[in-house]
Amino acid sequence: MQLNYIANQSVPSASSQTIDVIDPSDGQAYDQIQRSVAADIDDAVGAARHALDSVWCKLSAAERGRLLMRLSLKITEHAQELADIEQRDCGKPTKQARADAAALARYFEFYAGACDKLHGQTIPYLDGYSVLTWREAHGVTGHIIPWNYPMQIFGRSVGGALAAGNVCVVKPAEDACLSLIRVAQLAAEVGFAPGVINMVTGYGHEVGAALARHRGIDHISFTGSPRVGTLIQQVAAERHCPVTLELGGKSPQIVFADADLDAALPAIINAIVQNAGQTCSAGSRLLVAQAIYEPLLARLGTAFENLRVGPAQLDLDVGPLIRRSQQQRVADFLDDAHAAGIPIVAEGKVVEQAPPSGFYQAPVLLRDVPVSHRVAQEEVFGPVLCALPFRDEDHAVELANATQFGLVAGVWSANGARQLRMARRLRSGQVFINNYGAGGGVELPFGGVKSSGHGREKGFEALFGFTTLKTVAIRHG
Ligand code: NAI
Ligand code: MG
């Protein structure tokens, strides 16, 4: 049984209740986590506050950086163990689980180097004055992590927060806690003081909500659904607590007739099947110039038919979805698409070795999807790609911007002027030109516009969100 990790101690929840840990590859329970309650958050916030005031605030930025680097190296040493844990807990194919462990180490490496590079400014002001700014930590930061990339999202969120001088209370998703509990233990082993990183598991509407409304939390980072993002911002607003929200997307891949299709096709497929489509930056809409619509769909269709879905350990193209309700959610979208007469171009195959009790969904390529249909508007979070033709550049921009989301966009074209025009006109937080980084790029600021959220994580930019600015004006004559 897994326990919470508070002040470098493994502790049970005050509730004395647990939640089963499920392997999505066969749907079977194989462990339990704590079903924590508000009292556990009180303990974690208390431990974090104590750590901040007694130890963490006294470390120099360089010392903080060294600690983060030690954790990065420790994660690398334990990368296989962490990948194995995440593989079973989340149903990740081996390559994906290993990539996630490597990304976690890379986040801590990146933020280790950033600790002592973050500084304020001096500002010209009136005669006889000097003005300077300090970047100060918020204090105790709350991190509500989703289940699709536990290690990666922990890395970007907690790595950035620690680098900026904060301490952390982390609430992983109820479906995906095990790797993060282990990382918190590794952090203690490399010398993180008790209370700097605290891990409290449980249901979102119980312990996640308790974290979001806790008066001792000074900043909240949340990645997950728009519905929960709204709830969190509402409760945070009551005490004017800043929030960073990353709420997913419906990201378009826009392919012009002059695109290099040999380069584009593998990237387009990967961007929707990676992690079984459960990726916030999944390229889930394919907008194609009319002139190449049919030939491109023919090539993509063949590739989709060859995609294989099965247990995580077989390391096929696609693993299972995270849980039964997610499988049902994707099936509901496909039923709606079917009822609306939306044609299927091609589907992948679930292999025979896949246990029927696992949460499998074959990748599906849909064509001629009406832009207003919910499968083209909402985040499916499964391996479902919607293709739509466009007439010209204006039409491509109109379709690309026609959802509530704005996280990432991909543009495939050989025309440099068009690449830049598109990059300017697309309403999204990232634009990839002739490449597509679903989830990638530790160094690259990441976050959305519109319902995709606000604030930026990843890269150096994240440190501005994890700090507040103090202006000091001195009149010296
Ligand atoms: P969710 O938004 O409920 O879960 C994300 C995290 O929020 C989990 O840790 C959960 O325990 C926590 N949470 C849930 N309710 C909460 C509350 N009231 N207060 C505080 N924390 C709470 O997402 P869910 O239901 O697991 O997935 C539904 C859909 O959300 C997915 O199909 C997908 O479309 C989207 N999603 C997007 C993600 C992204 O990367 N942007 C990640 C996960 C889900
Ligand atoms: Mg699980």
Image: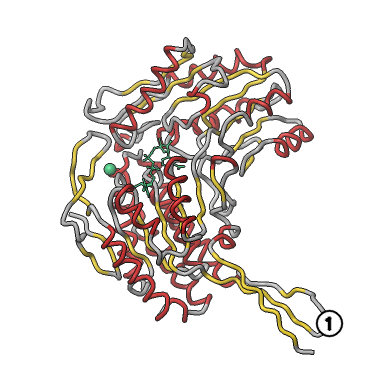
Q: Residue most toward the right?
A: 127
Q: How many marks?
A: 1
Which quadrant is home to the C terminus?
Answer: bottom right
> Identity of the amino acid at label 1?
Asp
In the picture, measured across the screen, residue 133 lies left or right of residue 137, that is: right
Crowding around mark 1 (Cα neighbors within 10 Å: few <14, some 14 to 19, many 20+) is: few
Residue 70 appears in the rendering:
yes
Q: Quadrant of residue 13?
A: bottom left
Q: Quadrant of ligand 2?
A: top left
Residue 377 in percent (x, y) is at 52, 27
Judged from the image, the secondary structure of the residue bearing numbered disc 1 is loop
Residue 295 in percent (x, y) is at 60, 14
Viewer-closest of 348 and 431: 431
Mark 1 CB within 8 Å of ligand 1: no
Residue 110 in percent (x, y) is at 53, 61
Please report the residue visible at 22 percent of the width from the left and 54 percent of the height from the top.
34
Q: In the rendered image, which residue does mark 1 sit on? A: 127
Please report the residue visible at 27 percent of the width from the left and 36 percent of the height from the top.
24
Q: Quadrant of residue 428?
A: top right
Residue 75 in percent (x, y) is at 38, 60
